[in-house]
Image: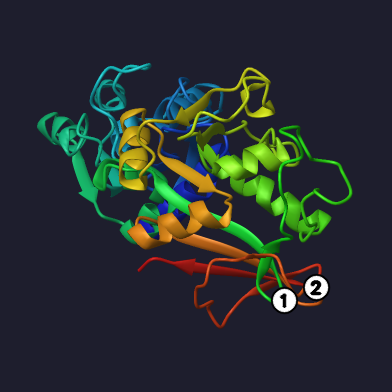
């Protein structure tokens, strides 16, 4: 039996829950009959607080023509170690034992201290054969945000900005008598992204639990920071207000979405530590330059996404953070999309 093929399928179906399960990990499960390698049922973690992948896999089995299969003659493949604790749902390891499985193949162990090998231990103590570490790197990539929270004790940090060909993220703007300036001709933000690249930004908002901008961005643009062009939830909104100058009617406080404002402590190491304490496993930082450069100086980041408009120049304005971009890029609507990882 080719274990890797079935774990690859687990990873594939796990991604179906990508925009809905945070802060939980994405997990897929596949039940296979040993004698002929027939896939009997599949399941994935679909929504935070609801059934895990293993639960959904067995539920789908009960609705299929294979519901009377001899479970001891089957193998359950799962991309992440089955949980062993009572949370919003009962332990999946206990369910697997009750079902009488003969073998379980696990992509990787769960670093969550509530599990961390205890699920595998429960299965083995019940006499179930357990294989661990199949396609582990691929399983880690699937849940890099979840792993960052539990291994580095901070959110996975993604920095994002768009810049002109001559290296500016915006024209120079000021507040107009303390009033919101968004929409005015002279003080509106420089339009760099295209409709298609804007969709990709909203995809990134859906992929991350939180989104952050600096004080100046809130004051100049009065943004809502919603995910309106991609499926999934709106991210938690985060900003800094060290001088207590963000008005109470700012749109960052609208729509009934949680907003976190840091006033007394605004240094990045503290912010990421506090976000981790709130169980936030990832954050997308959209700027501006002052905030982005502060984060870059700390070295506490994981990915940088830069959109470059190769035909747009403005000569003067707000300089983009100065980093060396990779040689490779993806092209969308004539714009170049670069991804740099903090190796």
Mark 2 and mark 1: Cα distance apart in space: 6 Å
Percent of width and height locating residue 127: 13, 33
Viewer-side residue, 140 vs 191? 191
Q: Is residue 257 left or right of residue 135?
A: right
Helix, strand, or loop for circle 2?
loop
Q: Which residue, as the protein is rendered here, is positioned at the far left?
A: 125
Q: Is residue 285 left or right of residue 275?
A: right
Going from N to C along the chain, the mark reached first, 2 or 1, is 1
Residue at coordinates 72% horizontally, 71% vertically from top-left? 316
Q: Secondary structure at mark 1?
A: loop
Residue 153 visible, this angle: yes
Coloring applied to the structure? rainbow
**Image quarter of residue 228:** top right
Would you name the residue on which mark 2 appears?
Answer: 312
Mark 1, other Cα within 10 Å: few <14 / some 14–19 / many ≥20: some
Task: Determine the residue positioned at 76% across, 77% down.
Answer: 310
Residue 315 point in image, percent of width and height: 75, 75
Residue 305 image position (x, y, % from top left) = 57, 62
Residue 179: percent from the left, percent from the top? 75, 32
Compared with 306, 63 (above or below) is: above
Point out the image quarter for the C terminus: bottom left
Q: Nearer the viewer, residue 229 or 170?
A: 170
Along the line of sight, which residue is nearer the eye, 93 or 109?
Answer: 109
Asked if residue 239 is positioned above or below residue 65 in the image, the reply reads below
Q: Residue at x 56, y 27 (%)?
A: 64
Pointers 2 and 1 in contact (C-beta within 8 Å): yes
Instruction: Tell me which residue sits at (63%, 24%) in the image.
Output: 247
> Which class describes the residues within 10 Å of circle 2: few (<14), some (14-19), or many (20+)?
some
- Can residue 2 be spotted in the picture? no
Q: Residue furthest bottom?
A: 327
Q: Which residue is mark 1?
A: 165
Quadrant, the N terminus? bottom left
């Amino acid at each position: 039996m080719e274990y890797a093929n079935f774990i690859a399928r687990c990873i594939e179906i796990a991604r179906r829950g990508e925009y809905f399960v945070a802060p939980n990990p994405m997990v897929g499960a596949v039940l296979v009959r040993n004698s002929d390698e027939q896939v009997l049922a599949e399941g994935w973690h679909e929504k935070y607080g609801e059934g895990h992948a293993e639960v959904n896999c067995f539920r789908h089995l009960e609705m299929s023509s294979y519901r009377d299969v001899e479970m001891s003659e089957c193998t359950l493949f799962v991309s992440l170690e089955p949980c062993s604790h009572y949370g919003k749902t009962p332990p999946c390891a206990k369910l697997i034992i009750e079902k009488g499985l003969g073998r379980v193949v696990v992509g990787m162990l769960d670093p969550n201290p509530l599990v961390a090998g205890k699920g595998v231990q429960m299965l083995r103590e019940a006499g179930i054969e357990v294989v661990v570490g199949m396609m582990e790197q691929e399983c880690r990539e699937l849940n890099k945000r979840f792993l960052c929270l539990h291994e580095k004790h901070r959110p996975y940090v993604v920095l994002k900005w768009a810049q002109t060909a001559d290296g500016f993220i915006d024209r120079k703007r000021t507040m107009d008598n303390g009033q919101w300036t968004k929409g005015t001709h002279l003080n509106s933000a420089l339009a760099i992204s295209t409709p298609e690249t804007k969709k990709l930004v909203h995809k990134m908002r859906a992929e991350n639990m939180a989104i952050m901008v600096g004080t100046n961005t809130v004051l100049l643009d009065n943004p809502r920071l919603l995910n309106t062009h991609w499926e999934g939830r709106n991210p938690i909104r985060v900003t800094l207000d060290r001088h207590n100058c963000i008005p109470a009617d700012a749109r960052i406080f609208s729509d009934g979405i949680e907003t976190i404002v840091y006033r007394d402590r605004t240094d990045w190491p503290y912010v990421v530590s506090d976000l981790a304490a709130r169980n936030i496993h990832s954050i997308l930082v959209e700027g501006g330059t002052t905030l982005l450069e502060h984060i870059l100086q700390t070295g506490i980041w994981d990915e940088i996404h830069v959109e470059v408009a190769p035909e747009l120049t403005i000569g003067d304005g707000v300089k983009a953070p100065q980093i060396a971009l990779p040689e490779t890029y993806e092209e969308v609507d004539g714009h170049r999309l670069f991804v740099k990882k903090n190796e």
